[in-house]
Amino acid sequence: MAVLEQSGNTPGMVVQLNEKRKGESLWVESWRRLRRNKAAVVGGIIILLNLLVSIFAPVIALKPYDKQVLVDNNAAPEWVTKVFPNMKPREEGGYVTVNNSYPLGADQLGRDMFSRIVYGTRVSLTVAFVGPLVSILIGTTVGLIAGYFGGILDNLLMRLVEIMYAFPTLLFIILLMTFFRTSFANPEAGTLAYTLGQIDLASGGMLFIFIGIGLTSWMQMARLVRGQVLSVREQEYIEAAHAMGAQTGRVMFGHILPNILGPLIVAETLTIPTYISYEAFLSFIGLGVNPPTPSWGSMIAEGSRTISSYPNQAIFPALALFLIMFAFNFLGDGLRDALDPRMRGVD
Amino acid sequence: MGKFITRRILWMFLVLFVISLITFFLMRNVPGGPFAREKPLPEATVKLLNEKYNLDAPVVEQYLDYIGDIVLPRITTGKLTPSSAEDYLVSIPLSGSGEDQKTLQWINFGPTYKSRSRSVNDIFRENLPVSFQLGVAALTIALAIGVPLGTIAALKRNTIYDYIGMGTAILGVSFPVIITAPVLQYLFGVQWGLVPVTGWEGPQYAILPAFALGFVNAALIARLTRASLLQVLNEDYIRTARAKGLTERSVIVAHALRNSLIPVVTILGPLFAALVTGTFVVETIFGIPGMGRYFVTSITGRDYPVIMGTILLYAFFLVVMNLLVDLAYMWIDPRIRFD
């Protein structure tokens, strides 16, 4: 019977084999489609430029990002006072100290805004690239297990996902961040808590941001992976792998995972802007990166307090944040169209 | 149908219970307490405060007390003063008067440690309506812009309308409120002086924050509407509707649009819950006395009953909205059946 079934499937297997050989060209083809998408290319270039800025930040930034020159607090260059008409220079009877050595002005502590925005690129980009890892790790594992084993395990895990969904994400992140920040503040040397606390300090407070965001946003990934596994699980090549005596782990990670990777990449790319805005939000409320590490979110928070007098202090970091979110949105959209043309225009 | 709703409501209570459990024990494990100050209070004071709020009891007992105060209705005897009535959301005088006054009281979310005269219920009464109005206004703006924009983009697919519409939508989703709020505030409040910059004293104060909140969600809804309408337009029943000679207008409005609303309705549940319970960023930037700030200040100040109250309030809105969304599915698409 099994033999008959196998022979019955021969044409299908041939297609499978051909597809395998063409497997590389599938990515090549996606790459070609992606390059044809102008919006995605623009997005990609903006991200690359940001990447360069973050790598060469010490060269690009004119001043140290944390140096406070108190006499220059709230100073602005001439062009900024022209763009924002309510910022009248002191010479013309206004209140703004004009100082052209700050390209975008200085904040209320007299720190160079331009340098802070340049260094802020590092935080946002790290969140964009490393942030999703935790949620991918948890989400993929839960989704694979639920989809592959099914039954009670599936039921339990999916109920857990449902309960987690009912938590207000941001509130849960705040609670977790407060927990991390205070629990790992002064632990004894040599313990795991100490090591984690040190890594967090070394990363300017980013480690706990990653963990916090990851722990609250893996559910969507788990659902997606589970759905994909369910549709792939019954296909012939999985049956073939089983028949050849492959272990469960090998089937899950060696056969199923690579075949559902496309939609996962697309889904993650599309959520990158969400991670970036979470970090900005956390820094906005003061639970994000440790000061004086500059983050656009905390700059917006500080700037928006004085928006009537010094709009440049909130508007410039807001524009920087917008640019990177916009770039990732366009690239994500393009990736989706390129990797899965059937999904074109479908969310 | 009845069975479905019963089961869903039971499930709702289970979810709320689990959430209260996780939150309670997580927050009690966060180091620091409600009375920790930079300059520490005298030990005796802290001890008295802990006794007053029953914080020295075993945590499990505190949890049961807390849940009991919310869930169990109780009949109290004693003079009904405004403050004793306000501690409970439901307070119905039964019989007697004066000192023998018997009152049925139900749902007490506890005190707030930060103010002696206020309770969590007071916060709900005074601050929730503000956030609610703002949230409903924002949601209305999001739907009023999003659905038409997505519909036009789908109907005029691959034309200039589609590209402009969807380009705007991608721009829109790249504008989280943390960006739109200061930019709108500067342009319309400071630069052109059309609307007040901050505060909450009249309808004109709601315009900017509602648009700041509505804009990003309008973009989200526009993209969802377009994608789902495109899918629906390929369905057989649309071809049938056209074949039987319906006008294009009634094909679109009565058949296509109605069915394409399902994904939009799906996200409306969580969106509604998030918007009406307050958004910290917008309320901070525009100085609005809503619920939003309690989501943050309660946690940083370890104001335990307020943390529980805000999380449970949000979760309650969410599970109720999700139930309504499921019921709306059946109305939108009669083929959907739950059993």
Image (tube, rainbow, N blue to C red):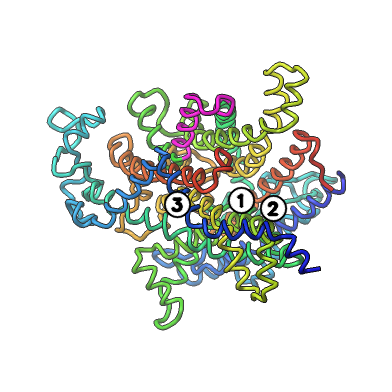
Q: CA distance from mark 1 to mark 3?
A: 62 Å
- Front residue of A77/A323: it is A323
Residue B108: image tag: 2
Nearer to us of marks 1 and 3 is: 3
Nearer to us of marks 3 and 2 is: 3
Q: Position of residue A302 (x, y in %)?
A: 34, 46
Compared across the picture, whether A20 is left or right of A1 comes to left
Residue in the image at 20% along x and 52% along y: A61
Q: Position of residue A299 (x, y in %)?
A: 33, 48
- Front residue of A151/A98: it is A151
Q: Position of residue A33 (x, y in %)?
A: 45, 43
Q: Which residue is mark 1?
A: B119
Taken as a whole, is the magenta stretch helix, strand or loop?
helix
**In the image, what residue type sits under mark 1?**
Ser
Question: Is-magenta flag for residue A311?
Answer: no
Q: Which residue is mark 3?
A: A28
Mark closest to the chain's N terminus, 1 or 2: 2
**In the image, what residue type sits under mark 2?**
Asn
The answer to which image quadrant residue A15 occupies is bottom right
Q: Are marks 1 and 2 in contact (CB under 8 Å)?
A: yes
